[in-house]
Image (cartoon, rainbow, N blue to C red):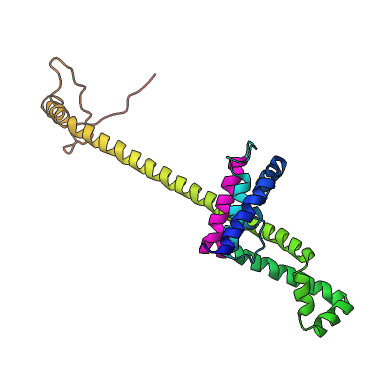
């Protein structure tokens, strides 16, 4: 370990020793009150902070709100939020996603400012004369940085809302497919049970049919059958006359 790192550790320990309990509690409240989708806010870092700066800042703040050193009832929650923020900012993919939203926010703010400058001739001329230095200076100002933070919040919120809606639709579709699958299984189950029952009663049905074929056409003993109506008489020996009624 180099001498500069040793000096830094001693400086940090000295700083923590001077921190009052009230300051620790305030830091817990600050962390828990941060915009949840922006890990830079949790660590109190600018958007251009390097991974090394992320690690140093996490170490400083995590010691400040560590549950073993901070008596605030939500210290553990704040400590976990800092850990998650560091994890996101050290993950290249997650960090890249957030910085993409920062870039989009800057573009929107620049476009808005460009429209405003068109109305302000003096500012427009100054911007042209300075060859962009005027705009660079403005983007380093506290005013622009605050606008940037707000705009990033808006974009991240919109992205998260879209993601959740998409996730909800996916869940609904998965639920519908699962329901259809269960209904199909139930249909095939009923069909199989019906076929099995039909096969089980096959012998009984065959026996009943044979009994019907033996006795069904002969009729019962002693049964008087009605005379058949003669509808045709090729020899003309029988003529059916209409019945006269009084």
Mostly what secondary structure, the magenta segment?
A: helix
Report the residue that reaches farthest toward the left.
Answer: 214
Count of numbered tags: 0
Residues 222 and 52: in front is: 52
Residues 167 and 230: in front is: 167
Report the residue that reaches farthest toward the front.
Answer: 3
Q: Quadrant of the C terminus?
A: top left
Residue 123 appears in view: yes
- Residue 47 painted magenta: no
The image position of residue 23, as x and y in percent, is 71, 44
Left of 136 or right of it: where is 204? Answer: left
The image position of residue 217, as x and y in percent, is 14, 27
Vertical side of 51 occupied by 168: above or below: above
Residue 97 appears in view: no
In the image, the segment drawn in magenta is 75-96
State which quadrant residue 210 falls in: top left
State which quadrant residue 78 falls in: top right
Left of 236 or right of it: where is 21? Answer: right
- Residue 80 painted magenta: yes
Left of 225 or right of it: where is 177? Answer: right
The image position of residue 16, as x and y in percent, is 65, 48
Vertical side of 150 occupied by 81: above or below: above
> Measuring 77% from the left and 74% from the top, which residue is drawn there?
137
The image position of residue 94, as x and y in percent, is 54, 60
> Measuring 78% from the left and 64% from the top, which residue is drawn there?
142
Residues 242 and 29: in front is: 29
């Amino acid at each position: 370990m180099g001498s500069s790192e040793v000096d830094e550790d001693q400086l940090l320990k000295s700083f923590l020793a001077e921190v009052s309990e009230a300051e620790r509690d305030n830091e817990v409240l600050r962390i828990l009150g941060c915009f949840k989708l922006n890990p830079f806010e949790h660590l109190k870092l600018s958007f251009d902070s390097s991974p090394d700066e992320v690690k140093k800042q996490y170490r400083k703040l995590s010691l400040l709100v560590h549950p073993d050193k901070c008596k605030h009832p939500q210290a553990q929650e704040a400590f976990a939020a800092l850990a998650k923020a560091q994890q996101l900012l050290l993950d290249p993919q997650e960090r890249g996603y957030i910085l993409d939203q920062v870039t989009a926010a800057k573009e929107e703010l620049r476009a808005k400012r460009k429209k405003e400058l068109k109305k302000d001739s003096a500012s427009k001329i100054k911007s042209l004369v300075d060859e962009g230095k005027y705009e660079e200076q403005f983007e380093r100002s506290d005013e622009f940085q605050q606008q940037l933070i707000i705009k990033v919040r808006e974009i991240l919120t919109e992205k998260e809302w879209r993601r959740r809606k998409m996730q909800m639709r996916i869940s609904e579709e998965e639920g519908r497919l699962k329901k259809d699958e269960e209904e199909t299984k139930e249909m095939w189950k009923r069909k199989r049970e019906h076929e099995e029952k039909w096969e089980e009663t096959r012998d009984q049905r065959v026996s009943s049919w044979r009994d019907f074929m033996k006795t069904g056409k002969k009729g019962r003993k002693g049964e008087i059958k009605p005379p058949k109506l003669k509808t045709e008489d090729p020899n003309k020996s029988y003529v059916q006359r209409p019945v006269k009624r009084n």
